[in-house]
Amino acid sequence: MVLLISEIKDIAKRLTAAGDRKQYNSIIKLINELVIPENVTQLEEDETEKNLRFLVMSLFQIFRKLFSRGDLTLPSSKKSTLEKEQFVNWCRKVYEAFKTKLLAIISDIPFETSLGLDSLDVYLQLAELESTHFASEKGAPFFPNKTFRKLIIALWSSNMGEIEDVKSSGASENLIIVEFTEKYYTKFADIQYYFQSEFNQLLEDPAYQDLLLKNVGKWLALVNHDKHCSSVDADLEIFVPNPPQAIENESKFKSNFEKNWLSLLNGQLSLQQYKSILLILHKRIIPHFHTPTKLMDFLTDSYNLQSSNKNAGVVPILALNGLFELMKRFNLEYPNFYMKLYQIINPDLMHVKYRARFFRLMDVFLSSTHLSAHLVASFIKKLARLTLESPPSAIVTVIPFIYNLIRKHPNCMIMLHNPAFISNPFQTPDQVANLKTLKENYVDPFDVHESDPELTHALDSSLWELASLMEHYHPNVATLAKIFAQPFKKLSYNMEDFLDWNYDSLLNAESSRKLKTLPTLEFEAFTNVFDNEDGDGEASSQGNVYLPGVAW
């Protein structure tokens, strides 16, 4: 940058103060000064960035003055002259050069800088001025689509502070995208409407398809909220003074929103982005789709992912929400749904952070009284079997869940109290002997490897796993498991009281528990590990120990 701030001030003052067109050539001089240094790290210097920011704001004030003077507005046919048209066209050409410079700043600077944010604000303010002055006639509805489309391309080309949060959401933390989303997209209905419309057209353009589809993280950062203009509770404002009535077309917005999502879902998704989309799909995507059933293929593929991809992890679990929403609201028929649900239950389920979500949904799925006893028994048995290798925080969720299932499906009570294995004082010696032989030769008929819950023979088995839990090392688990040794007087447990337990909550509950009697501790104090200084063998029961006062 050659010009000093004082020189920029002087030029801007002359341009805005007088209507002398001879001074307008100075605008080109200022625009030519608006160049990103070849070594972009120079922008990290306060002075360089300060000068460029001042230049951007000065040019904005100049063009705002030109708008007010009508120098950028084409005259009507009645008042039009060749000289006037040529002048306006020249002004517009210079104006477009300025916008191109702003877009270059937005798209090309690779690190966080206030210059980029200023350029974004200036560009959108210019778009607002265009909506007033570029309309076909004064007061006519107009939205600058072409200007807005160029901004979308620049935003998607930007790497400003680009950090893809792989560990959490897969959403981009690009500073420009975040600023645009928070300051404009989530506040203005017309910006949302035309963003979706222009984005859809860009996706159909082969020149920009690759750019848009590769940056799904930016899309997630943009749309992961509840303030869509198709939502009744959005309460959005209008950005341009007089927008076209098209923005009130909710159906069109949903249609564009739907097309954009479907295109991106077929693009390059990371596993974290896949998970993030499934997490918000039922709440922030499906309600804003024109035809939600178009998500069937995506959801069913996600639900089936475990059988084809061992690294699928929690993806099938997260797909349940959306799948259930389509089944409930749009009558989606999913064959072998319960077989797939049964297959999802594995040891990994007890350790994932979405465990509570899964149990909430499974509670809904298994609540129907029309389910066969064999199917429900398989779920009960498999969950009980998993408790043998699960952490206490997961077991305290499974125990009341099994209790509620047995209460809802009394036919499964035979797994706890099988008459064939119960003795009574009126049995003959032969019956007692047969019962003893039956117990000694008992082999659990449950087939843990069977994928079809109707064929596992779980109903012929017993819940001996619950009996083992009564002797669990964790007192909370042992106490809770004893509900199966008592009469079933409680109608059901509120699962919300158990779903969010973890190691911290278990330890806090145990440490805050008031003990009726204090435990008795007895030990001898030692001063050394070995009494025998020669080290030839036996350690005495008393004497020296390595840590005094510790019981060994």
Image (cartoon, rainbow, N blue to C red):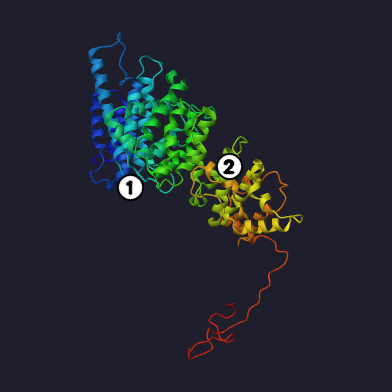
**Would residue 404 be found to the left or right of residue 167 on screen?**
right
Please give the residue where the numbered disc 1 appears in the rendered image: 46
Residue lying furthest bottom in this view? 534
**Regarding mark 1 in the picture, which secondary structure is present there?**
helix
Front residue of 139/29: it is 139
Front residue of 62/347: it is 347
Residue drawn where x is 60% and y is 47% of the image: 460
Q: Does residue 477 appear in the picture of this structure?
A: no
CA distance separating discs 1 and 2: 73 Å
The amino acid type found where label 1 is placed reads: Asp
Residue drawn where x is 47% and y is 22% of the image: 250
Sequence-first tag of 1 and 2: 1
Q: Does residue 97 appear in the picture of this structure?
A: yes
Please give the residue where the numbered disc 2 appears in the rendered image: 374
Q: Is residue 30 above or below residue 547?
A: above
Q: In this view, does 424 lie above or below 29?
A: below
The amino acid type found where label 2 is placed reads: His
Q: Residue 385: percent from the left, percent from the top? A: 55, 53
**Regarding mark 2 in the picture, which secondary structure is present there?**
helix
The C terminus is located in which quarter? bottom right
